[in-house]
Amino acid sequence: MINVLVVEDEPPIQRMICKAISGIDQDFRVRYTAYNGIQARRILEAEEVDVVFTDIMMIGGDGITLLQYLHENRPEIQTVVLSGYDKFEYAKQAYKNGVTDYLLKPVNKTELRDILGVLKTQYNLRMRNRRQECFKCLLDGRTMPENSCFYDELLSSPWYLLLIRVFGRDGVKGGQNPESRELLESGLIRIFGNGDTVFQTSDGAGEYVVAVKDSIPDVKAKALELLAVMEPWEGVITIAGLPGTCRAQDFRQHLLELRIQIMTESIYGKSCYSCGGYSCPPHDDMWEQDIKTEAFSAMAASLKAGDLRGVCSRLDVFLKEFEEKNKTCMAIENFMMEFLERGKGSSHSVRASVWNAVYETFSYGELKERVFRLAERLNGQDEDMAEDGNSEEAMPQMVVMIEQYLMDNYQRNIKAGELSMEFGFVSEYISRIFKKYVGLSPSRYLTKIRMEKACQLIKSHPEIQVKEVADQVGYKDIHYFSKVFRKEMGVWPSEYK
């Protein structure tokens, strides 16, 4: 409901305007009225107001002064001027103070209806942006805006969580393509509802994190409808969902699960939806049982011998079969890795190049071209594939390796600069690249791992001492651990059940 304040010093006109607003659009509720700017300011300082309709010439506080106050102190409130004076100077002053529109009295109902439509559109957009800002704060682990009704709404409702990855032609991530963003965002609002959905984009990553209220029926059907909406666009959209609802406080934890789910269950080259073991269309995450050992060995031998024509013809056959059987990206990655390792041996650069070839393309034609170029490089210029770790192409694999390193070493006191020494890049660069793909800095990600492990320890061993939990998850200072735990989980370790 959009709360309206009408400021008009002539009672008959005030009643007429209030009645007209309420009669034209039920979403507008005239909750407050005032006869001058001074009364209006008292209301604005005490009550929640979304839209102000105000006269210009009033005794005891004129409209221009009120507009100046709103413009300087409450710019989020939309304003409409009501005036019996068709004077350019009044209109100029009004628009200078951010007025949405200027209506002459007596008010024309058709004009009023049009203005209410504009006001509602702007209000819905502003509310959506505010809700999404709260949602982003939750995902980032930042402090919520004070007195935010949207924060209370997020915490009080169970939510279905979806992760959407969009990838377009010519290697353009969907998040960077205005056409795909508009298509997807309008589809999200139309299918799930503007008031029951919040979503946040990861700039440049083609990723959308979507939370849907549990009051929305059949989320699976709506996710499939979203796939159909995106079908005309030349690209691939992958949607991963949790099988049940979750709390807003757990969004960050579940987001990591969904990222892993997309990595393991997305179908190469096709739009798909996966949730709780269900996949549409059905996928196949294995490759060995579909490949004859002799044919695979012959292709690897061709690579080893430098027979790229033989490699290409056999690769064509395999990829065509994979496409028909809806192989997952992970299955394709494992197949390519095994083929190249058998043909030319293994290195970090080779593994990184395979990872990029699979996850940065969305058609088998592109994939074959990338792998063939890689085979040419391996065959003709092995020194180019040395593990120098300096190519931008190797970055996604480096992120995977850093992630694994943090998971393997979370119990140790990982000092500043350790990642830089381990992986050969300056700390700022590692942090920027890691955050681009994972959504958190390495230090925040390490904290997340430690808190998850701490929660698991407390749940599985209710009698465990807080000091012992701190020691096992990499904190030597029990007080610091307790402060971090409370900040992340909302309760002290001793209160966590």
Image (cartoon, rainbow, N blue to C red):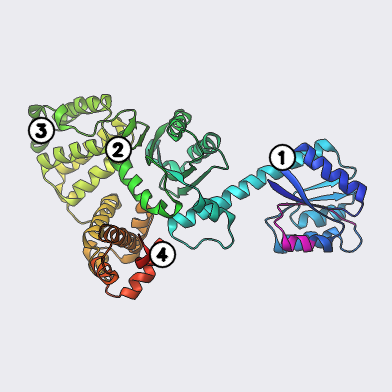
State the residue in front, 171 or 80.
80
Kindly state the secondary structure of the residue where label 4 is placed. Answer: loop
Q: Amino acid at mark 1?
A: Gly
Of the residues tagged 2 and 4, which is closer to the observer?
4
Q: Which mark is residue 265?
A: 2
Mark 2 is surrounded, within 10 Å at the Cα level, by few (under 14), some (14 to 19) or many (20 or more) other residues, namely many
Q: CA distance from mark 4 to mark 3?
A: 61 Å
Q: Residue at x 48, y 41 (%)?
A: 214
In the rendered view of the protein, which quadrant contains the C terminus?
bottom left
Q: CA distance from mark 2 to mark 4?
A: 35 Å
Q: CA distance from mark 2 to mark 1?
A: 44 Å
Asked if labels 4 and 2 touch by Cβ distance under 8 angstroms, the answer is no
Badge 1 or badge 4: first in the primary sequence: 1
Q: Which residue is mark 4?
A: 491
Mark 3 is surrounded, within 10 Å at the Cα level, by few (under 14), some (14 to 19) or many (20 or more) other residues, namely some
Q: Amino acid at mark 2?
A: Glu
Q: Residue at x 90, y 47 (%)?
A: 13
Q: Which mark is residue 302?
A: 3
Residue 211 x/y as whole percent: 47, 45
Residue 295 x/y as whole percent: 10, 27
Residue 331 x/y as whole percent: 22, 36
Kindly state the secondary structure of the residue where label 3 is placed. Answer: helix
State the residue in front, 239 or 241.
241
Q: Amino acid at mark 4?
A: Val
State the residue in front, 23 or 173.
23
Q: Which residue is mark 1?
A: 117
Q: Amino acid at mark 3?
A: Ser
State the residue in front, 483 or 167.
483
Badge 4 or badge 3: first in the primary sequence: 3
In the rendered view of the protein, which quadrant contains the N terminus?
top right
